[in-house]
Image (cartoon, rainbow, N blue to C red):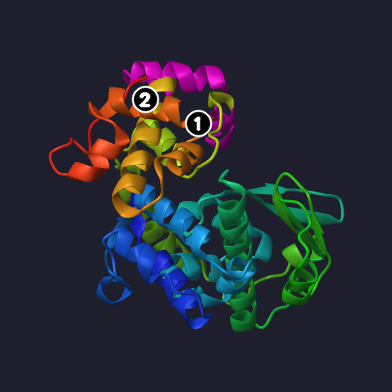
Amino acid sequence: MSTRSILGLIYLVQGMQQLGEDPSAVLERHGLSLERLDPSTRIDRTRELRIYADLAASITDPLIGLKLGGFYGLAGYGPLVMLLMTCETAYDALQTGIRYQRLTYLFGTLGFEPGEHVSALVLTPMAMEPRAFRFRVDGEIAGTYKLVRDMQVTLGLDIHAERIDIPYPRPDDAAAYERYFSCPVSFGHEQARFWIRNEHLRLRLPTADRNAHAMYRTMCDQQLVAQQQSTETLSDRVLTHLGLFSGSYPTAEDVAKSLNLSERTLRRQLGDEGSNFRDLLAQARYAKARHLLTHTTLPVEAIAQQLGYAESAAFIHAFQRWAGKSPAAWRHSGAQGHGSNGDAST
């Protein structure tokens, strides 16, 4: 599995605490505590995403994701910030940020959309269930905005967004977004966009330094190589994605789109790995069922609904096939000795 710095999670849960939310119960369910997290360690992306999805289900303030963007500091990005600040122009820094985006805390994908007078930094978010989606999208938009603004303050520049597009329907508290970003904000788009005037992108950075830039590029390249040596398979990535949902699950076509693949390519590559989408969906459901049976007191009917079953009988039948016993019997006897890491098949 691929890993990355745990700093992003630390910033997030620290911010939640300062904003009056309590992430401790979610962390405990995942065997973690904020006090014992080591900032120098790394976390599996699958595990991190599941924690974010569970945190989203626990929040009381719908604007919390937006507010959390302010808790990501420049220092947490390591040599990437110095690489950006030693670029020749703002445009070069933007393109470099896109190239090295895997060194950020994003799960979405950055791109660039040129225009005649204004151009856009585009964020294509990872699909998640609605509540987790807004929580994660708001955090990534606000965090990206904070990174750019902090760099501008350091450099003595003012490269502000002309407007911002957000990829979900307009919420009741939409006015808070224009106050936060100090520019017009439009909702209901497929992607997030920061629209910037082209003359701002042509501004030369006062800290431009070719020699230092080459040094920091080497450091960032080394970090990318270390990430690319991951043994994560496409099956792992599909399971990660499916693990973010409850109530209903995306189709193979939806998952392929989120992973920037065609459905045909997704199915072919899964077949090359000896897997298939149907079995992976069963594994994701089985894993969520075990988690809910172990860590909650939800009745079997409610768990069936979270797994996307219209009838609890269908869930009970599937679980018996996966675990060899009914959900009630599995919960009663405890998870020990039940092969909690085993596979499921449909």
Residue 32 on image: x %, y %: 28, 65
Find out whether residue 255 is within the magenta segment: yes
Q: Residues within 10 Å of mark 2 (few under 14, many from 20)?
A: many
The residue under the point 38% across, 50% down is 45
- In this rendering, the answer to whether 184 lies above or below 120 is below
* Residue underneath mark 2: 318
Q: Is residue 317 left or right of residue 134?
A: left
Residue 335 in view here: no
Task: Return the residue found at the far left.
Answer: 337
- In this rendering, the answer to whether 150 lies above or below 226 is below
Instruction: Identify residue type, mark 2.
Output: Ala
**Disc marking residue 309:** 1
Instruction: Identify residue type, mark 1.
Output: Tyr
- What is the span of residues highlighted in magenta in the rendered image? 254-277
Residue 47 on image: x %, y %: 35, 51
Say if mark 2 contacts mark 1, CB within 8 Å. yes
In the picture, the quarter occupied by the C terminus is top left
Find out whether residue 334 is within the magenta segment: no
Front residue of 301 and 222? 301
Where disc 1 sits, the SS reads: loop
Q: Is residue 206 left or right of residue 339?
A: right
The residue under the point 76% across, 68% down is 173
